[in-house]
Amino acid sequence: MEQIGRLLAANEGYAAARANVADQRPSRRLAVVTCMDARIDVFAALGLHLGEAHVIRNAGGRVTEDVLRSLALSAHVLGVDTVVVMQHTRCGLAGVTDEDLRQLTGADLEFFPIDDHAAALRADIELLATKAYLEPLEVIAGFIYDVESGEVDDVVRWERPA
C-alpha cells in the first residue's frame, strides 16, 4: 500500500500543475515504439513534450500484433505519419531465446528476443512498411538508444516512395 499511497500523493501535485493538452492527436504526427525499460525517458531522450507523440511501450520495443493495432488507429484516426521504433542497449531480451524466457516465466508466449538490434529493427520496419493498412505512414525509422550515454543511433530509415 505504501507504493500506491506515494503514487496518489504525487498525482495530487501533478494534477494541480499539469499542462492541459486538448487534442488527442499528436501534434508532431509521430508515434514512438520503444521498450518498457525504466531507464528510458522517451520524452527527454527525443526532445518531446506532452501532446506531441504517441508512445507505445512493450518488452524489447518490438513490433507485435498489439503495436500494429495501436499504429493502425494512430495512422488512420489520429493523423500519425511518422513512426520511430527504438530499441536499446543492455536489453533483457538480448542474448536469450524464447525457450529461455518461457522457462523463466512459465508463460507459453512468443517473447521476440533480440539477437542483433540492427537486424531486429530492419525486420520490424519491413513489417510496418509492408502492412497495407499502414499506408498513411510516410517515414519509419529505427533507432538504438544507449542506456549508458543517452545517445541515439539512427540505424535504419524507410520512406514511402513518392
Image (cartoon, helix red, strand yellow):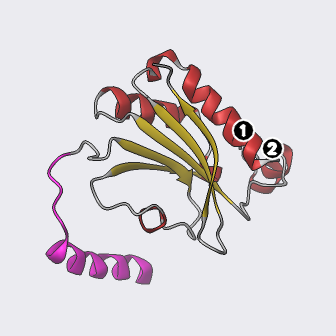
Residue at 15 percent of width and 76 percent of height: 16
Residue at 85 percent of width and 51 percent of height: 100
Residue at the spot of label 2? 98
Q: Residues within 10 Å of mark 2 (few under 14, many from 20)?
A: some
Q: Place residue 14 in its image quadrant.
A: bottom left
Residue at 30 percent of width and 52 percent of height: 52
- State the residue in front, 137 or 124: 137
Q: CA distance from mark 1 to mark 2?
A: 6 Å
Q: Residues within 10 Å of mark 1 (few under 14, many from 20)?
A: few
* Image position of 106 (left or right of 146): right
The quadrant in which the N terminus is found is bottom left
Where residue 7 appears, as percent x and y from the top left, is 35, 76
> Would residue 108 be visible to someone looking at this image?
no
Residue contact at pointers 1 and 2, CB within 8 angstroms: yes
Q: Residue most toward the top?
A: 132
- Residue 123 part of the magenta segment: no
Q: Residue most toward the front?
A: 162
Q: In the rendering, which numbered label is found on residue 110?
A: 1
Task: Name the kind of residue labelled 1 in the image.
Answer: Glu
Question: N-terminal of the two: label 1 or label 2?
Answer: 2
The stretch in magenta equals 1-23
Task: Name the kind of residue labelled 2 in the image.
Answer: Asp
Q: Place residue 124 in its image quadrant.
A: top right
